[in-house]
Amino acid sequence: MRQSIYTLVVLILILCFSAGQGWSDDTAETSSEAPVDVLQDDFLSDDYLDFEDDMYGVDDIYDPLEPLNRVFFEFNDRMYFWVWKPVKIGYSYIIPAELRECLGNFFNNLSAPIRLVNNLLQGRFEDAGVVVLRFFINSTVGVYGLADVALQEFNLEPRLADFGQTLGVYGLGEGVYVCWPILGPSNLRHSTGLIGDAMLSPLSYTNMTVDQGALYYAVNNINFLSLSPDVYEEMKKFSLDPYIATRQSFYDFRRNIVKMAAEGETDF
Amino acid sequence: MKKNIQIAYIALFFLSLMISPVSATTGPQEQLRPTLSRLVEILGDADLKGDENKKERRNIIMTTISERFDFGEMSKRVLGATWRDINEEQRKNFTIQMTKLLENNYIGQLENYSGETIEYVGERVKEDRAQVSTLIENNNVKYPVHYIMTEKDGKWMVYDINIEGVSLIRNYRAEFSSILRTEKFDGLMEILKEKNQSFE
């Protein structure tokens, strides 16, 4: 046990060192940073009319469970309008935005181990260093992670990474699409990633009961919803088939994240 | 001294000759920028705000951005292979409805934002295709929006909008291909019209 703590400390020191270097590189780069490349997409090429839909990432989504998924999607839709939304509105009314932002920062800071491990697994050592640096700055100067001082004062942007993404970088297939009740759009690879990430969360090392875990998830989710624009409602308003629109957006978003990680782009 | 000025004028004249053909083929970002700033200007215009001015505001916006946004091309791409199977009349009707939907989606969402600023991150050009990357700020959160453009006779035209990897056109294409499988083209047109009416 003691030895593994030593290893961890040494690892953190190495990372801090490499982050310091990465950090100075970053500040120099931000102005002339190349934008994320979305042009590579086959879908955007000009000979689109000669191809069938499967060339465009439209029909290559494997969804044999569609009838069941649609039931769960409908359930989540009700859940959103009957539970999440009203609770979110009440919650936003009672708790001021500043406090909710602090709570959001706190939740984010707690999940730093997930980002650290996955950045390392993806070979993004500089990003892993930034994660450690951000964690130390925010946990100390930012008072238990309540304030994102690393971003505000040191201009250190979050470096997101999760296990589903790592598996994608390693070339694992996506597997069937699953729209989980409550958790929403996912696929086999992404779901495996969620389990992996949950095991990396510090919360799984506390004596938390299932009820407490569910409560933590609910509060985290409500807090997150209260701080983000109504993405789901907007999407629903503008789509002709919200189930397909959600599924497609999920795949586009996740594939883009995996692609960028594989190509070493850090600016999501 | 006077002679020097004359020479300077002549030099300037020749310089201007050299510059003009260059400015005729400006890059995608340079071409998109004035259109977007005009769009932001119209959205910020107090005289055009509110639901009572919606029709006028939308008209002005659509005439402005149609110079840079190729809604015909977008409609074609959204439909994919089915575009070949329908006649001129159907294509025309579809393009009208699709343009309306894209207007409701893109402009409708921008109208909700207040005092947005557009920051240009950069451009990427590959032969006759380009991507112009921007960051749009709303409530202190920045959203990356990429405009995908293609060149037609020296004019760069937007034919897709990509937000965090999610393509607007591909999303509709996925929805439409699913609907077309069961409802066919006429059914799709009905659903499309109904959707547009819901924004009235």
Image: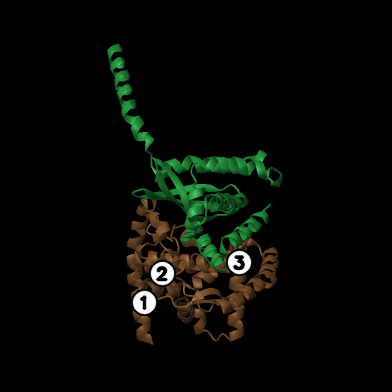
Chain colours: A brown, B green
Q: Residue furthest top?
A: B2
Upstream in sequence: badge 1 or badge 2 = 1
Residue at which label 2 appears: A132
Of residues B66 and B29, the one drawn nearer to the viewer in this rendering:
B66
Q: CA distance from mark 1 to mark 2?
A: 11 Å
Q: Residue at x 56, y 60 (%)?
A: B185
Report x, y in % for residue B111: 61, 49
**Tag 1: amino acid:** Val
Label 1 SS:
helix
Report x, y in % for residue B164: 47, 60
Of residues B197 and A40, the one drawn nearer to the viewer in this rendering:
B197
Q: Is residue A94 above or below residue B49?
A: below
**Number of the front mark, 3 or 2:** 3
Left or right: residue B29 compared with residue A74: left
Residue at which label 1 appears: A9
Res A113 → quadrant = bottom left
Upstream in sequence: badge 1 or badge 3 = 1
Residue at which label 3 appears: A225
